[in-house]
Structures are given as C-alpha cells and as structure tokens.
Image (cartoon, rainbow, N blue to C red):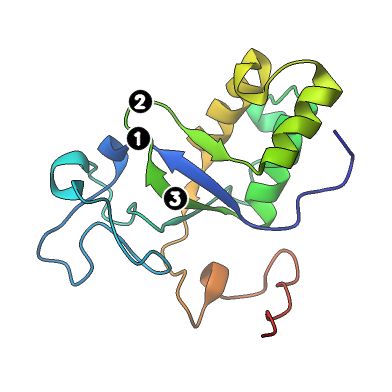
Amino acid sequence: MNDEPIRHALKIVIWGKWLHYNSSSATPGRRWPARLADFNAPNQYQGDNSALVMGSLLAIPPNVTVESLGLTTKAGKKIFQAMQDYSAYVVDDSGWDYNYLCLERSAELEYQEATGHEIHGDAALQADFAKIIAAVKVVDNNEPNSMGGGGTPRQPLAPPIKN
C-alpha cells in the first residue's frame, strides 16, 4: 500500500434500514447525484434522518481527528483523510447491518499484496472503518451548484472532464 493520499470522493454502501424514504417527496429515497433509489426502497428504507438517502454525501467534520477516533491502521487513516477532505457518496443498500467501502480491484490487490490479507478480512481495518462511519455527517447542501456543500473546499476540485 503506497503512501499517496486518496484524492477523490469515495463510494460507500450502507444498510438500507438507515436510509430514509418519503413517498411524498419529489425525489423519494434519493437526492442528487443519484438518479434512482432502490426498487424496493419503500419497504427497505426505514431511517429517520430525512437527509440520509441514496446519493447522500457523507463527510467527517473538520474538528474530528484520527487521534480522537483512535484509528490504528495505515489504511484506516488514509480512508479517514479522504472522507474528511473529499467525503463519500452513498451508492447502494448493503442488504444487511454492514457498511462497505467500494474499491477498484487494483486497490484490493495492492492492499492484499502489501498486508498479506484481503481488505474486507482485516479486523483492525474494519474496526477503524466502523469508527469512521460513526463519525460521518450528511452534507445536506450538496447540490449541482454547491458541490461538496459549497464554501471553500478543503482540497481543490478536480478539473472538468473533457469530451
């Protein structure tokens, strides 16, 4: 595992029981940038926080530190920094009481090569990730005209993608 920071938003999958669904909303069970909620969202989504839906941007507040969470793994600290600087989008329902970090296969292989075990089988990293998830807040004003919630970003935005 290299020492380079992660320089982009992450994708996470959380238990649908935490997600909110309001059938009278103009966009029930989702928010920008998500185009859809799960097909069974009216039954699956049972959360009370109306801001936490498919597409929600979750971030670690600036006052939270690696030390205050007691993170111990190099990968956990790297994920923490990415979630504080760039945040993470809720992209799916895990189907059970578990949270997943979505990874490219190359990142999984790099982790396995560096540590000798699979990322999802690393108990210390999973403990760190649970602490990170417990610390996140919904960025409620993340919209097309205020990506990341507006204001001064912690890190520069990526340049536009050219066709």
Residue at 74% from the left image edge and 40% from the top image edge: 106
- Residue under pointer 1: 15
Q: Which residue is farthest left?
A: 24
Question: CA–CA distance between discs 3 and 1?
Answer: 10 Å
Identify residue type, mark 1.
Trp
- Residue under pointer 2: 97
In the picture shown, does residue 130 fall above or below 84? above
Q: Secondary structure at mark 2?
A: loop
Q: Are marks 3 and 1 in contact (CB under 8 Å)?
A: no
Q: Position of residue 85 (x, y in %)?
A: 69, 56
Q: Earlier in the sequence, mark 2 or mark 3?
A: 3
128 left or right, relative to 44: right
* Residue 104 image-quadrant placement: top right
Q: Secondary structure at mark 3?
A: strand
Q: Are marks 2 and 1 in contact (CB under 8 Å)?
A: yes
Residue at 26% from the left image edge and 36% from the top image edge: 17
64 left or right, relative to 135: right
Q: Residues within 10 Å of mark 2 (few under 14, many from 20)?
A: few
Report the quarter where the N terminus lies. Answer: top right
- Residue under pointer 3: 90
